[in-house]
Amino acid sequence: TKTADSSSKMKSTVAVFLPVFIATASGFVSSPSTSCAKNHVHKPLFATGVNPQEPSVKVVEDMPDALPPLKNHYYLLRHGQSTANVEGIISSARSLAGSTKHGLTLLGIEQGRDSAPSLIDFIEQDLKDDDTTSTKEVYFYSSPFARAKETAEQCLAGMRANDEVAKRIEELGLKVNKEVMLDDGLMERYFGRLDGTELLTYAYVWPVDMFEPTHTAFDVESVAAVSTRIRSTILDIDSKHDEGGNHIVLTSHADVLQITQVYASGLDNVGKFSQYRFGNGEVRKMGRTVDTLPASIPLQPPERGI
């Protein structure tokens, strides 16, 4: 049955990740930011009040209200392969905003350009579904991290460089705005004491997300906190395009976009976001119902380069 399959998937996920998390929480695996000094006192696993690593990251106690109906169409674009992906490290420090560090690789640039046809496919489908309210204006918003900003720029470049895509844009009557607008609300999920460590340390966080979306283990930004800022960001962007009917691309990062898509769809447990993984340079329409989500995939350990 569907319920049995879901239970089996959850058990498989726990079997893969829980031993690592338990070992870490018990102190057998030290946090990357702590030392092994004899008299070292480990920091508490859960943060309270404000994030002690990054004051700009909010700590919240509950999930936000559901995302209300929006006036515009939204599309989610994950950045292409970055140098951090290749190095196999977590890259979430707020100091990266506006810098060029951890930008796209050559493959990442190609992935950004190759996202253009898929984006136009989604926009064309929206026009077929409801052409009467569309302004046919396309806007790009992006995280200020280099890998996201560069992906948005490469997607725009792909629209111009690909003759077939350019022809489709003309035939559809789309007006693509060339400016990429940066928004801090689209920044990467902050990983606290795990920032700069190997990708495998995601295993300390993602399984716990499924059971407690407000947790801040290792001073990470909780799923609830990401959902809260995404809600605020989308509502703010929607108000800036108050006439409605625009096509808005949000270029961001894997965890942020996965959380966004399941939160926007109304999934009952947003903490399961990691089962709806975005690939590098992948674009999806932001659906508003659970049936718009792709098939869930049991959580697997992260791999270098993606």
Image: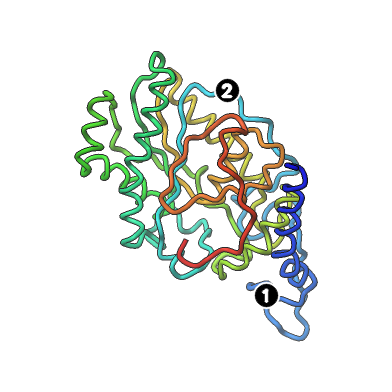
Dot 2, crowdedness within 10 Å: few (<14), some or many (≥20)?
few
Residue 199: name its quadrant.
bottom right
- The reply to whether callout 1 and callout 2 are in contact (CB within 8 Å) is no
Measured as percent of width and height from the top left, residue 13 is found at 70, 58
Residue 118: name its quadrant.
top left
Q: Nearer the viewer, residue 231 or 293?
A: 293
Dot 1, crowdedness within 10 Å: few (<14), some or many (≥20)?
few
Measured as percent of width and height from the top left, residue 262 is found at 61, 39
Q: Amino acid at mark 2?
A: Pro
Residue bearing mark 1? 34
Residue in view at x 68 percent, y 72 percent: 31
Residue bearing mark 2? 69
Q: Nearer the viewer, residue 8 or 63?
A: 8
Measured as percent of width and height from the top left, residue 14 is found at 74, 60
Q: Amino acid at mark 1?
A: Thr
Quadrant of image for the N terminus? top right
Q: Nearer the viewer, residue 171 or 42?
A: 171
Whether 47 is drawn above or below 269: the answer is: below
User: Which is more N-terminal, label 2 or label 1?
Assistant: 1
The alpha-carbon separation of the residues under discs 1 and 2 comes to: 45 Å
Residue in view at x 45 percent, y 48 percent: 78
Relative to 99, 201 lies left or right: right
Q: Nearer the viewer, residue 108 or 128?
A: 128
The residue furthest right is: 26
